[in-house]
Amino acid sequence: MNVYDSARIADMLQKEGYEEAKKQEEADLVLFNTCHIREKAAEKLFSDLGRAQAVAEERRAAGLKTVIGVAGCVVQAEDEQIIRRAPFVDFAVGPLMYHKIPQILRDMTENNEYKGVVHTDFPADSKFDFLPENKAQGACSYLAVQEGCNNFCTYCVVPYTRGAEYSRPVADVLKEAKRLIATGTVELNLLGQNVNSYHGEDEQGKERDLAYLLRRVAELDGLRRLRYTTSYPADVTDELIACHRDIEILMPYLHLPIQSGSDRILKAMNRRHRSGDYLRIVEKLQEANPALRMSSDFIVGFPGETDEDFQQTLDVVNRVKYIQAFSFKYSRRAGTPAAVMDNQVEEKVKKERLDILQKLLFSNQEAFNKSCIGKVMPVLFEQKGRHKGQLIGRTPYMQNLHIETDSANLNKIIEVEVIDATTNSLSGKEI
Ligand code: 5AD
Ligand code: SF4
């Protein structure tokens, strides 16, 4: 979502006459778009800001002004504190207020004074109504269809930083999708923190679900691949599962976070699914499309997690054989219910569990990648590789694949034979 937001911020700035600086030393404006999901992500901001300030000082010595701004969820969580912790920051906007950036910048240049503006309201109007039209940046594009979350998992800051669930109307989504396709998008990834609880209004004012939206988007001329991220297991409906059977361009890869395999921990996390429910959903999805493979997020060391709970997470991994996954040590986030639970797990234990889990996840990922050797796959080439004549693309399963090929194949889907594989990428040759 932050990648999407950053691109939309760049669209706005371009419209204001800004262009991308090649080096930070050349930048008149430095803007950080931030994540607050885990402590590490938030801390990174303050060290990056320190470096930006040092560059700004050097520029000042040379008579150049630098505006430093911060956007995103750290701003929402820190509010005015952000300016207190980093007083040289000129402005800060939360994730629902970034449409204000052009106005803030105009005010700053017109008044020519230090402002220290902070915007962290949850506005009644959607920011999407204020953003300029966007264009595809390449063959693969994100499109935010839903934002915010009402689930309140006990470890998570998202309901506080991105606010309550909001779904964009069907017509807005289709309009943006058409524009992206017309400007080069081949693969579209519909985004939302809780994308499968999408409930936007259609052209007649009727509330529609994600399954409906996927079918409408899939009909658009020129679109070759469709994905959606991230889903909440308890909101996976039979209609959504049927999409995986019916929609040919819906890719056979789904990110469906379980977080833990222990029902006791899932309950403490306030997740509305148990491991049995989750496994049944995966089974149904794979009945709908036998080629479908899964990825997930995991948290280890949630308060109260015992060795037995952790073993149940490993059991799920052994059952589902995820082809990719993200796994994290539980991070205490101020203001969330789990942060004040008195049965916090020791850092050492968290680390040990994460190592064990990641070893297993990586070995499954590598086994899947190696099982692809000798197979022919359609690969969408989306960027140039490091070496001349090399392109990097993605397979239907989101694996990165390198190939030596004509650069005319950039932004095209080409049938490729996989010739080698590691944990993180594949290499192939044209057939
Ligand atoms: N600690 C660790 N991981 C977290 N996530 C969310 N909040 C926390 C936290 N407090 C993880 C979840 C989620 C992903 C985006 O980040 O696994 O699915
Ligand atoms: Fe956070 Fe996802 Fe839970 Fe919402 S569903 S509270 S975004 S982990």
Image: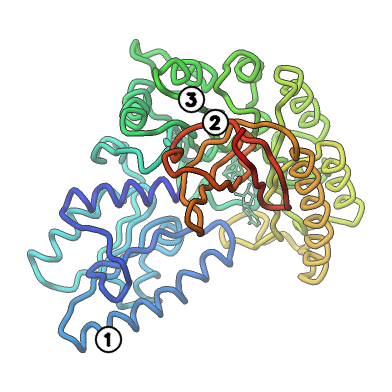
Would you say 119 lies left or right of 253 here?
left
- Compared to residue 1, the image places residue 169 above or below, namely above
Q: Position of residue 205 (x, y in %)?
A: 36, 14
In front here: 149 or 329?
A: 329
Residue sitting at x 38%, y 63%: 32
How far is the residue under mark 1 from the one under mark 2? 45 Å
Mark 2, residue position: 227
Residue 116, image x, y percentages:
25, 69
The residues tagged by marks 3 and 1 sit, at their Cα atoms, a distance apart of 48 Å
What residue is shown at x 53% (from left), y 48% (from top)? Answer: 158
Badge 1 density bin: few <14, some 14–19, many ≥20, Cα 10 Å: few
Identify whether 419 is placed above or below 178: below
Position of residue 148 measured from the top left corner of the image (x, y, whole percent): 48, 41
**Colour scheme of this structure image?**
rainbow
Q: Residues within 10 Å of mark 3 (few under 14, many from 20)?
A: some
Q: Secondary structure at mark 1?
A: helix
Asked whether mark 3 and ligand 1 are closer than 8 Å, the reply comes as no
Would residue 141 be visible to someone looking at this image? Answer: no
State the residue lying farthest toward the top: 204
Crowding near the residue tagged with mark 2, few <14, some 14–19, many ≥20 C-alpha atoms within 10 Å: many
4 relative position to 380: left or right = left
- Give the residue type at disc 2: Arg
Residue that label 3 marks: 224
Q: Which mark is residue 58?
A: 1
Give the mark nearer the N terminus: 1 vs 2.
1
